[in-house]
Image (tube, rainbow, N blue to C red):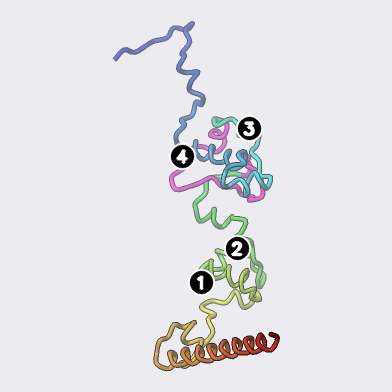
């Protein structure tokens, strides 16, 4: 293999093609690329949560991968880029490499909830109560439960007994009693629909 040695007055034409002194095609490089896409490209799927709501990139990083690399360093394994203030911009004082758990704890939707003098986010309260994060989210945002009730450990499913609608539909019980109750309910519903249809038909005949 021939090795070319350049004199002091010669130009390395290939060096001009290597835009960045730090290696591209790496996890760190793609973190920088993805950051730019989220904030600068309106066609990005993530635009609405970043550039679309005013999140910007500092001038030093916007078009300079080497400056970004110098400030944050090479991306460690199993860590990703995160902003300390989720409403702040991408800049050296607001960015760090963090674990996935730390990043999830720092999302906008994981708002802090204060209760009994303690402030934790949704994920942290769910872990404290030994329930799923989705369960706690539904209690607060879907069912609109009072905070005292929502922050209760364990299941809040209503108690049920055999031979009831709750037993068949909510508890998924298929014993003879629950099946009979389910069938009886449907008979009543069919009778109501039949009566309603007959009433409508009688009204139509009267009006005609």
Mark pair 2, 4: CA separation: 29 Å
* N-terminal-most mark, 4 or 1: 4
Within 10 Å of disc 3 (Cα), the crowding (few <14, some 14-19, many 20+) is some
Q: Residue at x 58, y 70 (%)?
A: 138
In reply to whether residue 78 is colored magenta, the answer given is yes
- Residue beneath label 1, please? 131
Mark pair 2, 1: CA separation: 14 Å
**In the depicted structure, whether residue 109 falls above or below residue 164:** above
Mark pair 4, 1: CA separation: 34 Å
SS state under label 1? loop
Please tell me which residue lies in front, 107 or 171. 171
- Residue beneath label 4, please? 27
SS state under label 2? strand
SS state under label 4? helix
The numbered dot on residue 60 is: 3
* N-terminal-most mark, 3 or 4: 4
Within 10 Å of disc 2 (Cα), the crowding (few <14, some 14-19, many 20+) is some
**In the depicted structure, whether residue 109 falls above or below residue 45:** below
- Residue beneath label 2, please? 121
* N-terminal-most mark, 2 or 4: 4
């Amino acid at each position: 293999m021939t090795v070319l040695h350049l004199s002091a007055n010669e130009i390395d034409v290939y060096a001009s093609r290597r835009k960045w002194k730090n290696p591209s095609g790496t996890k760190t490089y793609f973190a920088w690329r993805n950051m730019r896409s989220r904030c600068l490209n309106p066609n990005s799927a993530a635009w609405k949560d970043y550039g679309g709501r005013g999140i910007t990139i500092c001038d030093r990083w916007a078009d300079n991968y080497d400056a970004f690399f110098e400030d944050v360093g090479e991306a460690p394994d199993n860590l990703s880029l995160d902003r300390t203030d989720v409403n702040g911009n991408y800049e050296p004082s607001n960015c760090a490499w963090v674990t996935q758990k730390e990043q999830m704890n720092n999302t906008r939707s994981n708002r802090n909830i204060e209760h009994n003098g303690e402030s934790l986010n949704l994920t942290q309260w769910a872990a404290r109560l030994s329930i799923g994060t989705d369960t706690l989210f539904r209690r607060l945002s879907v069912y609109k439960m009072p905070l005292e009730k929502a922050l209760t450990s364990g299941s809040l499913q209503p108690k049920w007994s055999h031979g009831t609608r709750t037993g068949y539909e909510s508890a998924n019980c298929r014993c003879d009693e629950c099946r009979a109750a389910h069938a009886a309910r449907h008979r009543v519903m069919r009778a109501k629909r039949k009566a309603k249809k007959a009433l409508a038909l009688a009204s139509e005949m009267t009006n005609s």
